[in-house]
Image: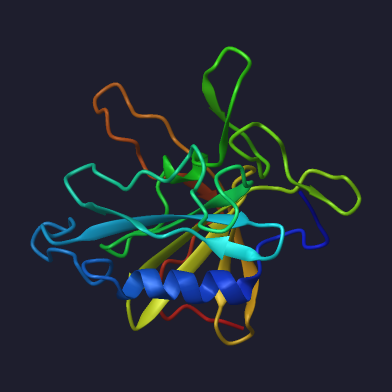
Amino acid sequence: MYSDEAAAPDDLLIPALKTLMSLPGASDACDPSTGRPRGDAAEYCLAVYRTPEDWRVSWPIRNLQGERSACTPPFGGVEDKDFGRNLPLFGFAHNHPCGTSMGSSDLKVFPAMKTTEGHWTMVEFAVAPNGAPARDSRGQLMPAWAWLATGRAAAPRIYKWNPAGQVYRWSEASKQWRFEATCEPQRPTNLSATLPPPRCVPELDVRDDAPQE
């Protein structure tokens, strides 16, 4: 699949992410006494992909939040009603119902392809389930991205990042992405199996009302 567009269009992604935040349990669903998602909180995942005609997002996959539960994106591809399954995925988008920023595990979730041994492995570029990569009009691989909608439903914080950990935040005022930080996932300590937050330089500004110039 060839395309002159090197990235999924914002006029598709931003409305899709805002819509995620309006779904039942997707936002403002934090228990103030524990700081954890309530029982009715839900995380939704969707895939971003391109057909020979246009860009699309898949139907959201919903998962009610347990202590460590999260939705599982469609790593093996999507079933498009017009073009079938063998379409390249450009990345995944999801929400955090408790207003938290991206976690260490989020920074590592990208499209996957099957190796010659039959195992699934994540890659840093857009790829179809059969392993065929998406290329631009110059024949270059098209990079994969991940997106997150979090914060309050009335004023969501929307982020995207690439496999290198370069994190951008959407500015509603200027209608463009603003570089925020370079983040790397952290491993669990010997005392806990829970992943600590990623290390970001500079530190991410997680205020819902952060300056949006």
171 over 66 or under it: above or below = below
Answer with left or right where residue 83 lies relative to residue 74: right
The single residue placed furthest to the top in the displayed view is 117
Question: Which residue: 59% across, 46% down?
Answer: 165
Answer with left or right where residue 50 lies relative to residue 19: right
Question: Which residue: 23% across, 72% down?
Answer: 28
From the top left corner, tell me how far across and down residue 128 is, in percent.
63, 40
On-image quarter of the C terminus: bottom right
Q: Quadrant of residue 169?
A: bottom right
Q: Pick the residue in front: 2 or 124.
A: 2
Q: Pick the residue in front: 165 or 108.
A: 108
Question: Which residue: 62% across, 34% down?
Answer: 123
| Type of colouring | rainbow
Answer with left or right where residue 61 lies relative to residue 63: right
From the top left corner, tell me how far across and down residue 206 is, in percent.
42, 66
From the top left corner, tell me how far across and down residue 40 is, in percent.
13, 61
81 over 104 or under it: above or below = below
The single residue placed furthest to the right in the displayed view is 138
Q: Quadrant of residue 12?
A: bottom right
The single residue placed furthest to the front in the displayed view is 82
From the top left corner, tell me how far across and down residue 145 is, in percent.
60, 52
Query: How many numbered marks does the figure carry?
Result: 0
Question: Which residue: 53% across, 73% down?
Answer: 14
138 over 173 or under it: above or below = above
